[in-house]
Image (cartoon, rainbow, N blue to C red):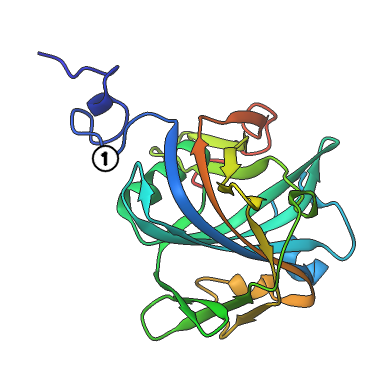
Amino acid sequence: MAIDLTGPSGFSMPMGASLYPPPPHHFHGAKLAWATYEADAEAVARMLPPGVKPDSSPPVCELWVCDYPSTTFGPYLEAYVHVRVELDGVRYWYQPVIFTNREPALAAGREIWGYAKKLATMAWREEAEQIIFTIERPVGKRLVTFSLSRDRLASPDEVEALPILSLRYIPPSDPERSPAAAELVRLDVEAGLHQTPVLGDVLWAGRASVAFDSPSEVDPWHLFKPTRMLAGHVQTANFSLPLGKVVKDYLAEGLADGKNG
């Protein structure tokens, strides 16, 4: 009997024993903290694909750190950088780098949306009045330390919600062929803040600190170090990740048709 390509075990590799099911992928009770800041334009430009440019000078970035206790993939931690960009007149948060610590989340993110995920060692803890999140890759090589206080309740209007943009690149499997995919994918996240009867939407603002503790040519997160901090926020939310939409196909435009990589 042939593999059923329409069922949950036929959506992703290995076919017949899928690592993850079809989207939407759901997240419940996610703790999300982030710092918004300005960064160096020349450094940020090194990590942006053709046609994607910051929408401001200096560029605005966000560092997000996440604790996901209940998801399609099981519980895990994640961290990523956003750059606020413009492509063909539309503004996005472009995601150049991302770490996770769970295998199905890594595979799904890379294969479906093109998220540039790598595995890393991360920790979320809360001490005194601060959230502390650390990233090491490999163990002992501290790349990032993030901290944030909860100082006041904030309005959702303080947060600029834009579509997420990512580069989905799949290299060729044959030296005589072009890459299997080279495209920019838009994702519109379906999300809602946790609410309480008294406070309504619960979103906190506070003092954020971000340290890119040591540079790494293997994981160049230090290119996104802050030059001026703008804001810090933390929230608890439920959200779902559907399939995305291709907004630019480099292969169709003849911009990524070179052979041998």
| Residue at the (70%, 54%) spot, across then down | 48
Nearer to the camera, 154 or 198: 198
The image quadrant where one finds the N terminus is top left
Disc 1 residue type?
Answer: Leu
Please tell me whether residue 43 is drawn above or below residue 112 in the rendered image.
below
Left or right, 182 with respect to 61, comes to left
| Residue at the (54%, 48%) spot, across then down | 237
Which of the 4 image quarters holds residue 58?
Answer: bottom right
Q: Residue 190, how many percent across, how many down?
A: 58, 35
Which of the 4 image quarters holds residue 2?
Answer: top left
Q: Is residue 46 visible?
A: no
Q: What residue does disc 1 label?
A: 19
| Residue at the (58%, 72%) spot, across then down | 220
Q: Residue furthest right?
A: 57
Please tell me whether residue 100 is drawn above or below residue 178 in the rendered image.
below
Nearer to the camera, 177 or 186: 186
Left or right, 96 with respect to 3, comes to right
Nearer to the camera, 3 or 37: 37
Please tell me whether residue 30 is drawn above or below residue 14 in the rendered image.
below
